[in-house]
Amino acid sequence: MKLPLNIDYTGKVVVVTGAGGLICGAMARAFAESGAKVAALDLNEDAVKKLASELKAEGYICEGYKANVLEADALEAVHEAVLRDLGPCDILVNGAGGNNPRATTDNEYHHEAKEGGKSFFDLDQSGVDFVFKLNFQGTLIPTQIFAKDMAERKCGNILNISSMNSFTPLTKIPAYSAAKAAISNFTKWLATHFAGTGVRCNAIAPGFLVSAQNRALLYNEDGTPTARSAKILNGTPMGRFVDADELIGATLFLCDDRSASAITGVVLPIDCGFAAYSGV
Ligand code: NAD
């Protein structure tokens, strides 16, 4: 990866949850290439082991750990393993998260709901719980476990992943939008709570990325944008999607105490202008 910023993270231990995925895999790689000792955590063990072995083969320091961000006891055991393998955590990136189809309505507007489709009234409670738990508790629990290392040593950084749907909710995904709003709120809470300890906490709010999971929702088979995709691009002043690599500069900047020493509690949109545009 061509790093956008040349910040030296040598010696820092960076724990990245969701590192088996698109965004946090790129972040884990960027920290490793910047000299950090990276602990890549994910439910998908194969993905983080593969990432770790690729990075090690390139001469970087990275260990992969199977971890469920919702299981505190198992996560404590991962924390012990990280302490043993790499040392205490300096930087925590809370990246595990996402939506679930069970918490998604079929229609944007209720008056357009079709017979047999999933309306707001049909949303599955267990799907809503899943999305809230994964995004909110999935950020709170790893922070309880890994930020202890930081509070004890009176320095460190937490980076949460919010979304531009936290500023204005997106149609069809009420639970995911609300859960990401909770992440933005919690980022400010943590920033305030830890301010006296020297631990900073910020978030990035990525816009729309094209990933393996959502490609079919965004593009038709012939490569033209779907109706939802066209709506997104029309609502994006820069007229394009965000690339995962475009999140790296802000990530490296916000987690560096020399660059961002007075920045805590911010939620930085990286969305090609989507959150700034009223549509008119
Ligand atoms: P992704 O699906 O590629 O990666 C998410 C990773 O989290 C996966 O590897 C998955 O195995 C892991 N995971 C899921 N549940 C877990 C659990 N309980 N414990 C540990 N790991 C778990 O998704 P992504 O697009 O890279 O998203 C990363 C973060 O960015 C998420 O928080 C997501 O909500 C957020 N985000 C994504 C977009 C986007 O357009 N892709 C936009 C805004 C915010």
Image (spheres, rainbow, N blue to C red):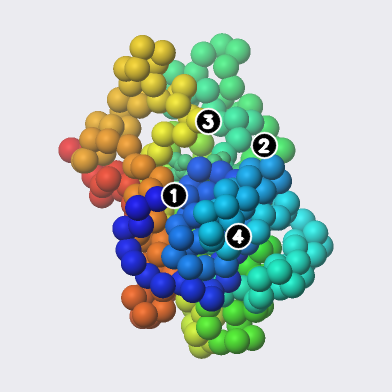
Is the CB atom of the residue marked by disc 2 within 8 angstroms of ligand 1's nearest atom? no
How many residues crowd around disc 1 within 10 Å: few (fewer than 14), some, or many (20 or more)?
Answer: many
> 167 or 233: nearer the eye?
233
Left or right of residue 76, residue 53 in this image: left
Residue 194, position in %: x, y? 54, 80
Residue furthest out toward the left:
280
Left or right of residue 118, residue 229 in this image: left
Residue at figure coordinates x 69%, y 42% from the top left? 46
Tag 1 secondary structure? loop
Residue type of the residue flagged with mark 1 = Ser
Tag 3 secondary structure? loop
Residue at figure coordinates x 57%, y 52% from the top left? 57
Name the residue beneath numbered marker 3. 213
> 11 or 99: nearer the eye?
11
Left or right of residue 153, residue 8 in this image: left
Q: Is residue 140 visible?
A: no
Image depth: mark 1 or mark 2 in front: 1
Q: Are marks 4 and 3 in contact (CB under 8 Å)?
A: no
Q: Earlier in the sequence, mark 2 or mark 4?
A: 4
Q: How many marks?
A: 4
Give the quadrant of the C terminus.
top left
Is the CB atom of the residue marked by disc 1 within 8 angstroms of ligand 1's nearest atom? yes
Report the image quarter containing ligand 1. top right
Instruction: Report how far apart the C-alphas of labels 4 and 3 lie in the structure.
Output: 26 Å
Image depth: mark 4 or mark 1 in front: 4
Residue type of the residue flagged with mark 3 = Gln
Name the residue beneath numbered marker 1. 163
Residue at figure coordinates x 27%, y 45% from the top left? 272
Q: Are marks 3 and 2 in contact (CB under 8 Å)?
A: no
Name the residue beneath numbered marker 2. 127
How many residues crowd around disc 4 within 10 Å: few (fewer than 14), some, or many (20 or more)?
Answer: many
